[in-house]
Amino acid sequence: MNYTTIDYHCDGGVATLAFNRPDKLNSFNATMHAEVREALDAARDDEAVRCLLVTGRGRGFCAGQDLSDRNVGAGDAPPDLEASIRENYNPLIQRITGMRKPVVCAVNGVAAGAGANIALACDIVIAARSASFIQAFCKIGLIPDSGGTWWLAHLAGRARALGLALTGERIDAATAKDWGLIWDCVDDEALPARARSLAEHFATQPTLGLGLTKAAVNAAFANDLPAQLDLEARLQGEAGRSADYREGVAAFMEKRKPRFSGK
Ligand code: LHQ
């Protein structure tokens, strides 16, 4: 597939999806939505892909919606943003959170609007020290979408969620880490190698078990303890039937390194 707004390639069990509209800070137009959707489906369906790495080209990670794609002139009818969210952003977030494989995000620069919340939807988020996160929506009369209100409230707590959402203030990567929004913050030069080596590590691990782990943790935000215990029992049953569980135990008993197939 010849993509024009993203790079997508797979090697060594890692699929890399890089937003690639650097002149627009990798903001989303309709083509990019369609291409990202297609790449995420390819990563989901390809058994050779055991980890997805999401990043951005150029100096930004992603500045959310391309605002020039959706100009609202004085005499124009208001655009149907609800439809745009339902058709584009919600399915995008659900593809990332629903993928039964680890999704690593390397935030290489500014992540604004939906771009910030796409990053937060990924499983392991590592940001360059110079990267930043901006809930830019309030500056143009919108609300945080792409799960923004959910991520902020659950990850950062009410005070910080409202602070970020109502002021649109920029926070740097170190603060995002300090507030529990992301996993780690590293020096800019170290970001590509660190993200890649983490993704390569995941690509050798028990993919099915990691996918079930992710599903369980994501469900924990909505479940009470009895419901979560029930879910854990069900998912552990599934994990226990995997070839990788058998291999993991065998390798432990034989005091050797496991060779996981991902199944
Ligand atoms: C952009 C953008 C951009 C177009 C930078 N669009 N060109 C969902 C449903 C439907 C509709 C509405 O939205 C949504 C979800 C959303 O994501 S709403 C939020 C949309 N995003 C924003 O409001 C962020 C807008 N961008 C910014 O505030 C700044 O660009 C940030 C703070 C991200 C970076 O600032 P700087 O580092 O100073 O860069 P810059 O502003 O100079 O941008 C560089 C270029 O990128 C520039 O173009 P130019 O031709 O002048 O060099 C910008 O126009 C372009 N760009 N974001 N979202």
Image (tube, grey):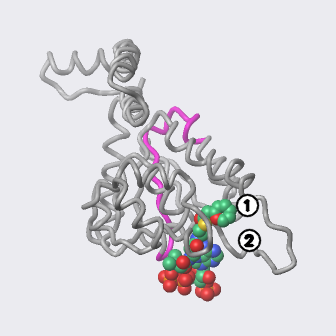
Q: Is any part of residue 190 visible from this angle? A: yes
Report the disc number at residue 30.
1
Residues shaded magenta: 42-59
Residue 228 point in image, percent of width and height? 36, 23
Q: Residue 44: within the magenta?
A: yes
Identify the element where label 2 is drawn: helix
| Above/below status of 164 relative to 241 | below
**What residue lies at 51% left-to-right and 37% top-to-bottom?**
99
| Ligand 1 has an atom within 8 Å of the beta carbon of the residue at disc 2 | yes
| Above/below status of 230 relative to 23 | above
Q: Amino acid at mark 2?
A: Asp
Which of these two is toward me, 154 or 198?
Answer: 154
Q: Is residue 255 left or right of residue 113?
A: left
| Above/below status of 221 relative to 103 | above
Which of these two is toward me, 34 or 110?
Answer: 110
Quarter of the view holding residue 143: bottom right
Q: Amino acid at mark 1?
A: Ala
**What residue lies at 42% left-to-right and 62% top-to-bottom?**
162
Label 2 near label 1: C-beta < 8 Å? Answer: yes
Residue at the disc numbered 2: 69
Q: Is residue 229 left or right of residue 13?
A: left
Which of these two is toward me, 101 or 93?
Answer: 93
